Image (spheres, rainbow, N blue to C red):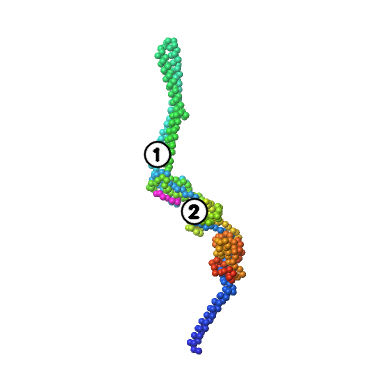
Amino acid sequence: MSQTDYAISLRRWIKRSLLIALVLAVAGFFLRDLILGKAVETHQATRSDLVQTVVASGRIMTPQRASVGAVTTGRVVRIPVEEGQSVKRGDILIVLDDEDESASVAQARGAVAQAEARLRQLREVGLPAAEQALIQAQANLTQARQQHERAKELKAKGFVSQAALDDAQRNLDVAESQLSAAKLQVATNRPSGSDFALAQTALAQARANLGVAQAKLDQTVILAPVDGTLIARNVEPGNVVQAGKELMVLAPEGETQVVVQIDEKNLAQLRIGQHALASADAFPRERFAAVLVYINPGIDALRGSVEVKLRAPEPPGYLRQDMTVSVDIEVARSAGTVVVPADTVRDANGAQPWVLAVDGGRATRRAVKLGLKGDGRVEVLDGVAPGDRLISASQATVGSGQRVRAVAAAGK
């Protein structure tokens, strides 16, 4: 046999050998699955704690916002604060031009001083003078009476004429009239008198006018109503502002709240006092504790959701007003229970959930009773024991009764 024929025969032998090996390998593979069963990835049921949560997203909010505006029209002359600055109650936020208001206060103060002087004049001058005039009038009346009595006696004896008696009577009448006038003047100048009351009323009116003028002057300086952070500013020096227009917004200091919208289907699971963990989208690795404090009694019909508020007892310093956050509200917890991966349960939301367990080398269908659901795991109350190997529902080609070989899923 030539070398060429030998080489050809050798190549043919090699090809036949490879083909036979391939056929044997394929046959062995299928025979292995036939004899030992199809290899399937399985997950092991374990015993551990399980927490069921309701997940939602929302925003950071303070319980209320303080809108700051002017109560009078005026031109802004100074703004000593910047947006984002923390302020204390009573700090100056905006200063308006106060030229007219200052003039009104000065005028009102002058009116008060004048009214006080009038009242002091009545007390220190008017009343003492009236009392002296009363004493003089009493003395004059006494003298007039004596003269009148003497004139009557002399007339009776014929020593004086009727005209002299008439003069004495006239002098007596005048003295009595003067006494009455003096008494009235004393009465009106006393604290219970009309002149004193009028002076007191004038003083009260002047002081009220001063109060109004001072209030208008005070309104030209806008103060922080509460401790907080300035989160919005819509005014600049030189602007003419109108009464009632919002110029600034303050986020008051106090408890930080997370306001979220929860799907109404989860409403039955929510309770006041439930604990939660929240994380800001800007700081996803940082989590902080929160407590559910409010469940809105109404439902948003357009979104099919209910508003829920959670309080953050110790909010981290990086939180900002209106910051977006994600919240996991703990609605139930089971300790030391049997749990399985959620993807091993078939018809989990149906009336008769079930699993495929590897039992005696075969896939066996088992009805199960489910409990809590959380973090990709499900609590099984009946039908599965710790250590059982379960076939993932994603392996749809595996049927009940089929011979299988359990292979642990990666990381399981």
Discs 2/1, front: 2
Q: Is residue 385 visible?
A: yes
Residue designated by label 2 = 300
Residue span colored magenta:
230-236
- Give percent across and percent down for residue 400: 58, 68
Q: Closer to the N terminus: mark 2 or mark 1?
A: 1
Residue 85 placed where, x, y %? Answer: 45, 51
Q: Residue at x 55, y 55 (%)?
A: 268
x and y, in percent, of residue 322 in the image: 47, 54
Callout 2 secondary element: loop
Categorize mark 1 by other alpha carbons within 10 Å: few (<14), some (14-19), many (20+): some
Image side of residue 205 versus residue 36, left or right = left
The answer to whether the residue labelled 2 contacts the one labelled 1, judged by CB atoms less than 8 Å apart, is no
Q: Amino acid at mark 2?
A: Asp
Q: Secondary structure at mark 1?
A: helix
At x 43%, y 19%, the residue is: 173
Q: Residue 28 in magenta?
A: no
Local crowd at mark 2 within 10 Å, few (<14), some, or many (≥20)?
few
Q: For residue 104, which numbered disc appears in the image?
A: 1
Q: Nearer the viewer, residue 123 or 100?
A: 100
In this picture, is 331 found above or below 412?
Answer: above
Among all residues in the image, which is located at the extreme top? 158
Residue 88: x and y in percent read 47, 47
In which image quadrant can residue 347 be found? bottom right
Compare residues 380 and 346 and report the one nearer the observer: 346
